[in-house]
Amino acid sequence: VISRALHQLSLRAGGPFVSVHCGAIPAELLESEVFGYTRGAFTGADKDRQGLLSLADSGTLFLDEIGEMPLPMQVKLLRVLQEGTFYPVGAREQKKIDIRLICATNADLPELVRQGRFREDLYYRIKGITLETVALDERRDDIPLLVNHFLAELAGKTAQQVQLAAPVLQWFLQRSWPGNVRELKNLVERLSI
């Protein structure tokens, strides 16, 4: 929610917003997903395919759970951030991109750096402006705002208006949210169904 808001309220709002969860894509596929590939780069690559970097050009790339990114991929990402160029898998020519990078993580990146599981140079490269969010349980005043936002999103997708009864919203305000905003959004979606 925060990364989309940052994008939509920025000078890059007219560009694409591309999001990827670094732990959701197997390590062996992450490079081709992020960088794209050329025809013949590997078995099954029967055509050129743009990667997420190209898709985010002139916009925002959101890397969720960057702490789960494999070390070899961290090296390649660092090069992209330093030079603004990259090679799609199997390509001989560099591609130039202009992106804003937003990263999120639940991990303690300085601790991962100490353990050798996250590159120190990449950590300092992405550590421009840090926004720390508190758990949803600690900001209950946001719950009605978020619920209304999620209901409006659903109405845009389904063309049906859904409202929560006051007792349901009151229950939302009283319960614990260990899954934070993702859990709230999921519950709103399930209740609307």
Image (spheres, helix red, strand yellow):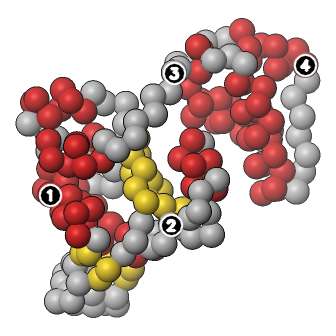
In front of the other: label 1 or label 2? 2
Could you give the CA–CA distance between mark 2 and mark 3, rounded to whole angstroms? Answer: 27 Å
Which residue: 64% across, 56% down? 8
Q: Dot 3 corresponds to which residue?
A: 134
> Where residue 179 appears, x then y in whole percent?
53, 25
Q: Residues within 10 Å of mark 2 (few under 14, many from 20)?
A: many
The reply, left or right, for residue 86 in relation to residue 121 is right
Tell me which numbered mark, 4 or 1, is placed earlier along the sequence.
1
Could you give the CA–CA distance between mark 4 and mark 1, rounded to whole angstroms? Answer: 51 Å
Tell me which numbered mark, 2 or 3, is placed earlier along the sequence.
2
Say which amino acid is labelled 2.
Gly
Tell me which numbered mark, 1 or 3, is placed earlier along the sequence.
1
Tell me the number on the disc at residue 59: 2
Q: Dot 1 corresponds to which residue?
A: 75
Could you give the CA–CA distance between mark 3 and mark 4, rounded to whole angstroms? Answer: 25 Å
Could you give the CA–CA distance between mark 1 and mark 3, rounded to whole angstroms? Answer: 30 Å
Say which amino acid is labelled 1.
Val
Q: Dot 4 corresponds to which residue?
A: 166
**What is the secondary structure assignment of the residue under circle 1?**
helix
Which residue: 90% across, 19% down? 166
Could you give the CA–CA distance between mark 4 and mark 2, rounded to whole angstroms? Answer: 39 Å
